[in-house]
Amino acid sequence: MQTRRKGRKIYTYRVKNRRVFSQYHPMRTALTTVLAVIVLLFLGLVGYNVVGPLASRLKKEAKHPTTTPNPYIYAEATMTALETTTVQTTTTVLTTTEEYLEPINEPLQLSLYLNPNALSDLDKLRTVVSEAAANGYGSVVVPLKLGGGALQYNSSVPEAKQSGASADTLPTLSEIASTISACGVFPVARIETTADSLLPIVKAEAGYRTTVEDKLWLDDAEGSGGKPWISPFSDVSRSYLQQIAAEISNAGFQRIICGGVAYPNFYAADLEALGPMLSDEASRRSGLVGMLNAIGETVPSAVYECDLSLAIDNQEEGLAPDQLSIGTACVMIDFHKFDGTFFYAAERYDVSKLAYEDKTLILMQIAEEITGAMNVLPCIRSDNLTEQQLQSVIDTMYEIGYSQILIQ
């Protein structure tokens, strides 16, 4: 059958070759009805499971806005389990940002750690301190007792002269302090504590002694340049450090930062030769705490210097806030050590993609938790930071309540 030029084909129910999907075919009508029912059911299902909860969530959000989550991941496993099993992680929401936003009533005070070479002579010291003052630093940290035991000033402590730690040709403490103060900057002192190989030479009882032969312990063979260390258990060592701290404080230094609070790296044979007190965790801690408390009793302005990354790994053995009489901790933060993931208190922190502002918030919260009731003086390692990154860290610390910040 051909279609005429003017008109159209007319199909009836009786036509043998009727098209099944024609608009008027009964099967098409049935299929259309079924499809319409399916679409309506689908739309109802979507509305119930998606649109409904979304609308409820929006109403709830309007009444109770959510807080900004801290960007770290909590692992539902202990450190031991993490070593052998796959970590299942979930996101934990905290409100640390709001807790830290406190009004700042004090101006920002920056303190710069000086290089030991700055004390080679008073003229150089004056130049270095003047530059620090011009760059906005209100105080400088002066290394007065170095690792190994050498003093950078002319000391009046007899053992310092006897051991060669001090010399008459060095400037006096009063000369150092007055030079710094003349530049409009406050002087802060720093001393190394246990890393002293000079005192045990003239006072053998100041060092570690073997239990069987009662010999002075060295950190290596004598022929290989082995050196002794002062023992924090020794009354002679504690008395010496007290005298050093006292004369520094009396010379006008605002604070004395006690650094290097640690034991040597003992081998198993060393621990066996030196006795059980250095193998017991509680005993080791009590030795360092006792030494720090002795200094703190003599000089109330003493500060305990600790490294945050070591403290997180439980390697700062002297950090016992509930046992220390020293009330301030200088917490050193090397941001280069926190560029990936780390664990603290069975929680996994991922800071690899965080801005320095957010990373600073997390690290300072941990620092406060680790140091307990102690006051915290944050110290920033700046050698791995750009000027912009350093400024960002300083601004964030100041905004959350730290008006005194040290820069190393």
Image (cartoon, rainbow, N blue to C red):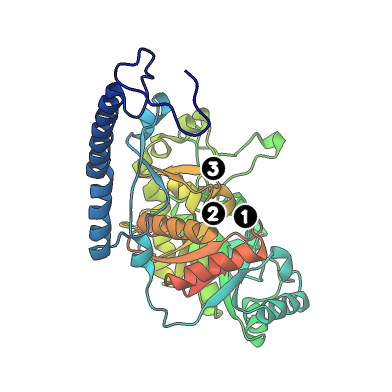
Which amino acid type corresponds to the residue marked 2 in the rendered image? Gly
Does 347 appear above or below 269?
A: below
Whichever of labels 2 and 1 marks the residue nearer the N terminus, that label is: 1
Does 221 sit above or below residue 285? Answer: above
Q: Is residue 160 visible?
A: yes
In the rendered structure, which amino acid carries the disc numbered 3?
A: Pro
Number of the label disc, if any, that sits on residue 264: 3
Near mark 3 (Cα within 10 A), the count class, few <14, some 14-19 or many ≥20, is few
As drawn, 59 above or below 135 = above
> In terms of depth relative to the viewer, which is nearer, 126 or 58?
58
Badge 1 amino acid? Gly
Q: Position of residue 356 (x, y in %)?
A: 54, 59
Q: What distance separates the C-alpha of mark 3 from that of mark 1?
A: 12 Å
Q: How many other residues sit within 10 Å of disc 1, few (<14), some (14-19) or many (≥20)?
A: some
- CA distance for labels 2 and 1: 8 Å
Mark 3 or mark 1, earlier in chain: 1
Q: Quadrant of the C terminus?
A: bottom right
Q: Front-most of 40 and 13?
A: 13
Q: Looking at the image, which residue is at 39% across and 58% down?
A: 365
Q: Are marks 3 and 1 in contact (CB under 8 Å)?
A: no
Does dot 3 land on a helix, a strand or a loop?
loop
- Could you tell me residue 129's position as x and y percent? 69, 77
SS for dot 2? loop
The residue shown at (49%, 56%) is: 359
Kind of element beneath mark 1:
loop
- Which residue is tagged 1? 147
Does any portion of residue 240 appear in the rendered image? no
Q: Where 253 falls versus 33 (above or below)?
A: below
Distance of mark 3 from mark 2, alpha carbons? 10 Å
Question: Can you identify the residue that label 2 sits on?
Answer: 260
Give residue 23's quadrant in the image: top left
Q: Position of residue 180 (x, y in %)?
A: 65, 81
